[in-house]
Image (cartoon, helix red, strand yellow):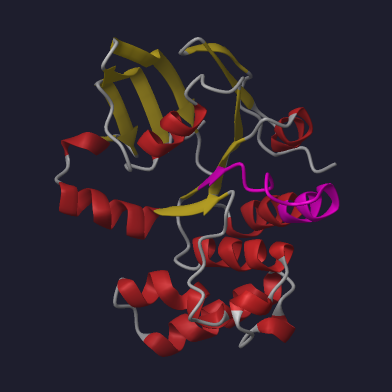
Amino acid sequence: MSEPLIRVSGLRKSFQTGDGTIEVLRGLDFEIQPGECLAIVGSSGVGKSTLLHILGALDHPTSGSVEFRGEDLFANSSDELARFRSDCLGFIFQFHHLLPEFNALENVMMPGLIANEPPEPLRDRAIALLGEVGLSHRVEHPVGKLSGGERQRVAVARAVVREPALLLADEPTGNLDPKTGDQVLDLLLELNRTHQSGLVVVTHSPEIATRLGRKLILSDGFVESAEPFTDAPISS
């Protein structure tokens, strides 16, 4: 097995409130391999989204470490973490968070434009990705006139456009009907196979977790169980 893409060691996260300290994560240890599909599951309030935000460098742990390709992620400055998020990660959320004043193509291109990529190759790549997600006929469509499923497909294409090493998805199908949600999950798994980006999905759905191929179950701030790494997700 190759060097882990992500290694989490002794990860703890707590929050201060008027009633005292709330410990959300209480010492997590696990690894994510390059190209792996992983589901993070558990009941509401166990810290699934908190963990995802730390993996995405959107929040800092209270203690412990997160290594990316063998380097301590949080030894970096704020500017370096911003570059890490831009260059190495793609984010997909339950709500698509598209920019309503731009069309589908412009939304997909946006991460590359912010990173000052040359616009023509970026445009070509964005158009190709919209084709991969089944939206060739919606390239210049205003996102406000797209269906919910189409908007989430645009959000998926946007997350992949910079060819990140890791995709982080927080309930990406939670705001969709079951049929459309299955289609979006199919798409994520297909992009994982074709682009070899790792995929971590926070979900309440046992069906989605089963299809991801590996589950990390959180309970009371601890890893209750973590199924062993498997080379490929379950596709159906």
Give yes or no for residue 98 being in the magenta stretch.
no
* Residue at image point 63% right, 52% down: 192
Residue 9: percent from left, percent from top = 34, 19
Residue 138: percent from left, percent from top = 69, 83
Residue 24: percent from left, percent from top = 40, 17
* Residue at image point 17% right, 54% down: 79
* Residue at image point 80% right, 49% down: 182
**Viewer-side residue, 182 vs 211:** 182
Left or right: residue 184 versus residue 81 is right
Left or right: residue 105 versus residue 63 is right
**Viewer-side residue, 16 vs 136:** 16
> Range of the magenta residues?
168-184
In this picture, is 80 found above or below 69?
below
**What quarter of the picture does the C terminus occupy?**
top right
In this picture, is 87 found above or below 136?
above
* Residue at image point 60% right, 83% down: 142
Kindly give the residue lying farthest to the left in the view shown: 77
In this picture, is 38 found above or below 189?
above
**Viewer-side residue, 224 vs 87:** 224
The image shows a total of numbered marks equal to 0
